[in-house]
Image (cartoon, rainbow, N blue to C red):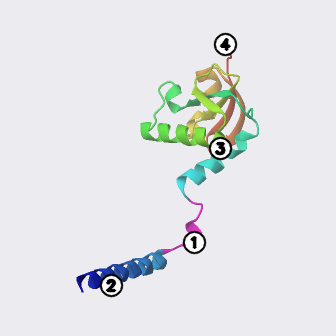
Amino acid sequence: MALAFLVISAVYQNVRTLEWAIGRWDQSLLGKDPATDWERRVERIRDDLPQRGVVGYLSEPNFPSAPYALNNVHEERALTQYFLTPLILVEGDHFEWIVGNFGDPFFDDKLEDALGVEELYNYGWGIYLLRGKPE
């Protein structure tokens, strides 16, 4: 008898949870997660990079005296690496091709002078294709 009550209670609670979830479901939110947004941000640079190999990566911490949020730096680098796989991103300016991630418009006209790299293309959303100083 106690087992039957337990089973009925569990089924009832699961049905209530399902009703609650269906009531909150909003299909318009599909594809609007931060990772998908980041993929849209970096997808345009993919065609201009080699298909395989190692490329450089520069962001706000590489810019002298630039303010930045440390938690965003690591998250953005990880997402950029994920969406540009099989390329390997290595921080530094000693590569022919460099992915630049500088979200603030403050950086737009300062990259070449401050970092000693050549800006090849600004894709918007703070993503740049840069040419470095290969060793």
Instruction: Answer few, some or many: residues within 10 Å of disc 2's Cα (few below 14, many 20 plus, some between 14 and 19).
Output: few
Q: Quadrant of residue 44?
A: top right
Chief SS of the magenta region:
loop
What separation in Å lies between label 4 and label 3 (alpha carbons)? 26 Å
Kind of residue at disc 1: Gln
Q: What element carries label 2?
A: helix
What separation in Å lies between label 3 and label 2 (alpha carbons)? 50 Å
For marks 4 and 3 on the same chain, the one whose residue lies earlier in the sequence? 3
What residue sits 65% from the left and 24% below the top?
112
What residue sits 48% from the left and 30% below the top?
66
The label shown at residue 27 is 1
- Would you say the residues marked 4 and 2 are in contact, meaning their CB atoms lie under 8 Å apart? no
In percent of width and height, residue 61 lies at 49, 29
Q: Mark 3 points at which residue?
A: 42
* Viewer-closest of 8 and 62: 8
What separation in Å lies between label 4 and label 1 (alpha carbons)? 50 Å
Q: What element carries label 3?
A: helix
What separation in Å lies between label 4 and label 2 (alpha carbons)? 70 Å
Q: What element carries label 4?
A: loop
The label shown at residue 8 is 2
The label shown at residue 135 is 4
Kind of residue at disc 2: Ile
Q: Which of marks 3 and 2 is in front?
A: 2
In percent of width and height, residue 23 lies at 46, 79
Q: Quadrant of residue 120?
A: top right
What residue sits 75% from the left and 32% below the top?
50
